[in-house]
Image (cartoon, rainbow, N blue to C red):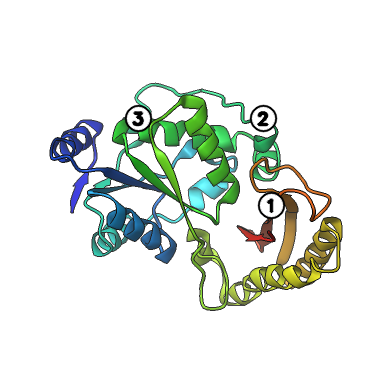
């Protein structure tokens, strides 16, 4: 595995692979890697001639400076993991390499970008779109891999590819969970032992809501999930929305679209966690 820090070195390496006729797969990450990231890289390595990954904590997508400061950074351990699971190239750039000139682009994702994370974290998806489009420009992948845990991000990255007419296939990979159901996240390591037990209740309640959906309306399920999560010590719901999985707009009936998803953001103490579940 080769580790590169400059855009020029990355381009040179990838040019060699392309000249050999190999497809390029790409996994963008912010580091602090776990088994969820490993699943993305394994899939990427299996489906492409070369697997590239990046480690870059993107300041533009943090609306909270304290969250940026506290975001875990473990580059040495990350590179060990990436090599173990099949990455061929790891791009670890400075902020100046990613943004050689200021990037103030604003992206209009319509109503899909103004709900859930878009409503709670103003400017977040502009930051995501800036870094993803910039990394796609540098790597020029044939395929890029994103986890379903960040469901709204996945939908909007696909929208970004359409908007910019980029020749890259976005591949979704299922959420990887701890044995107790908690969705794997780099932020989980900030939880205390007591908070960690409480956080596992999020998915247990989401899973129970599948049964509730057999007798309650979407609004009823929202009330059930919100109340149940808020009754767990340390947990506080920021939002729980049941939406059309393509438009991300609220649904009021289970008879609507065939792709219905419940998306939740919860504070466990001071740590913000997200998850989702598919109803149809």
Can residue 33 be seen here? The reply is no
**Residue at x 18%, y 35% (from the top left corner):** 9
Q: Of callouts 2 and 3, which one flags the residue occurring earlier in the amino acid sequence?
A: 2
- Residue 163 as seen in the image, left or right of residue 98: right
Q: Which residue is mark 2?
A: 110
Quarter of the image with the C terminus is: bottom right
CA gap, disc 1 and disc 2: 21 Å
Task: Point out residue 186 in the picture as x, y percentages from the top left corner.
Answer: 48, 59
- 218 or 91, which lies in front? 218
- 10 or 49, which lies in front? 49
Task: Point out residue 106 in the picture as x, y percentages from the top left corner.
Answer: 56, 24
Question: Which secondary structure, mark 1?
Answer: loop
Decide: is 85 above or below 96: below
Q: Which mark is residue 21?
A: none
Question: Which secondary structure, mark 2?
Answer: helix
Task: Point out residue 164 in the picture as x, y percentages from the top left corner.
Answer: 47, 25
**Residue at x 62%, y 77% (from the top left corner):** 197
């Amino acid at each position: 595995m080769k580790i590169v820090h400059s855009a020029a070195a990355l381009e040179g390496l990838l040019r060699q692979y392309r000249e050999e006729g190999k497809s390029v797969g790409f996994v963008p990450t912010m580091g602090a890697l776990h088994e969820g990231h490993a699943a993305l890289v394994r899939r990427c390595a299996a489906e492409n001639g070369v697997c590239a990954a990046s480690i870059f904590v993107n300041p533009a997508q943090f609306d909270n400076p304290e969250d940026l400061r506290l975001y875990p950074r473990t580059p040495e351990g990350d590179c060990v993991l990436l090599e173990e699971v099949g990455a061929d190239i790891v791009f670890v750039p400075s902020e100046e390499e990613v943004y050689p000139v200021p990037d103030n682009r604003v992206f209009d994702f319509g109503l899909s970008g103004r709900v859930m994370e878009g409503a709670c974290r103003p400017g977040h998806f502009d930051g995501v779109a800036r870094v993803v489009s910039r990394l796609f420009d540098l790597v020029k992948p044939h395929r890029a891999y994103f986890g379903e845990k960040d469901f709204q991000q996945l939908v909007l990255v696909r929208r970004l590819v359409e908007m910019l007419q980029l020749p890259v296939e976005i591949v979704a990979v299922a959420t990887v969970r701890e044995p107790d159901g908690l969705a794997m996240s780099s932020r989980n390591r900030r939880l205390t032992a007591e908070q960690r037990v409480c956080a596992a209740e999020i998915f247990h309640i989401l899973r129970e809501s599948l049964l509730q959906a057999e007798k309650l309306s979407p609004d009823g399920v929202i009330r059930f999930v919100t109340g149940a999560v808020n009754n767990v010590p340390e947990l506080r719901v920021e939002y729980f929305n049941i939406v059309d999985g393509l438009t991300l707009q609220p649904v009021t009936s289970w008879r609507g679209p065939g792709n219905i998803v419940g998306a939740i953001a919860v504070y466990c103490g001071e740590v913000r966690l997200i998850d989702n579940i598919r109803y149809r």
